[in-house]
Image (cartoon, helix red, strand yellow):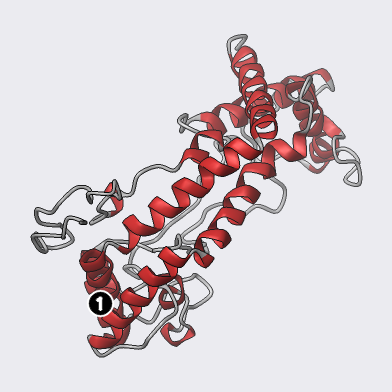
Amino acid sequence: MAIGLVGGDGGDGGYGGHAKVWADGTPVVWSDDEMPELPLASYEFDGADEKAYDRLESATQLLTQRCMVRHGFADFPRDPKYPGMAVSFTSTMVAVGTGPVGSYDLGNARRWGYGWNPAKKIAPREPAGRRMTAEESAVYYGDRDGERSGCYGQAYQRLERGIRDRERMWTYVSEREEAVRKQAERDPRVRRAFKVWADCVADKGFERYADPRKSFTDKTWGRGQDGNTERSERERGTAVADIECKRAHNTGGVWWSVAERLQRRELSAHAAEFASVRKDRDRLLAAARAVLETD
């Protein structure tokens, strides 16, 4: 028999005591931090290395700068602003998304529903160097119709030497993750879990949705160009009910348990492909580290 959930909300966005796992091994998910990592996560480009993208960008900038210097631009900055780039930013469009079961942030749901504090400004990192000139830009980009022309493209060419399948390295894992997500949605156990969750939300007086993703993307919430919502009373109430019902019935834990099984099946069925992707990724990151060691 499965161990039931116990405890309750531990305050603003917190959570109380509860069972950590059901008798069948299904994890009990009560907060975002309690959602376990799935097997395919270690095959993603950053994997367990949260600095992977940063190192690759730094190595690319260093190689590009050296190339520009060889072309006669002695003072070319390592991190240039691009032509036409605004001098500063105050805010930017934010890409808002959610996983198959959405967030467990109850404090955020109470205040902002499926959105966030509109007073919060999110700005992209500004390049540290000066703006490149039109002449520099032509050498930097080269032939815009050539995928690997110009100093920037040549930097990537050098880093990618020995990579067997560049496109697969960047896309394969995400494509398989999406395939597993679709399979999980059709799994009888997940379908039952989503139905129980939907019944719970409806019993609280809100709309019945097929799954938590649908509640997040409801057009009723009036998302603007920045991705934020109107944060109406009904939206906030729905977002709270969404989380309370996920906690009450362990919707996230059930989904994870099914997705974990399906991902392990993927790894077994396509072991050679995943191994090749990881090998190419590791080779690229090793090349980036080698370049940075020469700085």
Question: Residue at position x 82%, y 18% from top?
Answer: 70
Residue 207 rendering spot, x and y as whole percentages:
36, 88
| Residue 175, placed above or below residue 285 | below
**Residue furthest top in the image:** 294
Seen from the viewer's position, the closer of residues 148 and 113 is 113
Q: Quadrant of the C terminus?
A: top right
Amino acid at pointer 1: Ala
**Residue furthest front in the image:** 1
Q: In which quadrant of the rendered view does residue 100 lie?
A: bottom left
Whether residue 115 appears in this view of the structure is no
Instruction: Indicate left or right for 32 with 75 as reference.
Output: left
Label 1: which secondary element: helix
| Residue 205, placed above or below residue 174 | below
Instruction: Indicate left or right for 81 with 218 as reference.
Output: right
Write down the residue under mark 1.
Answer: 241
Please tell me how crowded label 1 is: few (under 14), some (14-19), or many (20+) other residues with Cα within 10 Å: many
Q: In which quadrant of the rendered view does residue 228 lie?
A: bottom left
Q: How many marks?
A: 1
Instruction: Indicate left or right for 194 with 159 as reference.
Output: left
Instruction: Indicate left or right for 138 with 123 as reference.
Output: right
Question: Residue at position x 53%, y 30% from top?
Answer: 52
Residue 39 rendering spot, x and y as whole percentages:
48, 39
Seen from the viewer's position, the closer of residues 169 and 86 is 169
Residue 38 rendering spot, x and y as whole percentages:
44, 43
Residue 146 rendering spot, x and y as whole percentages:
90, 41
Whether residue 180 appears in this view of the structure is yes
Q: In which quadrant of the rendered view does residue 159 lie?
A: top right
Q: Quadrant of the N terminus?
A: bottom left
| Residue 245, placed above or below residue 32 | below
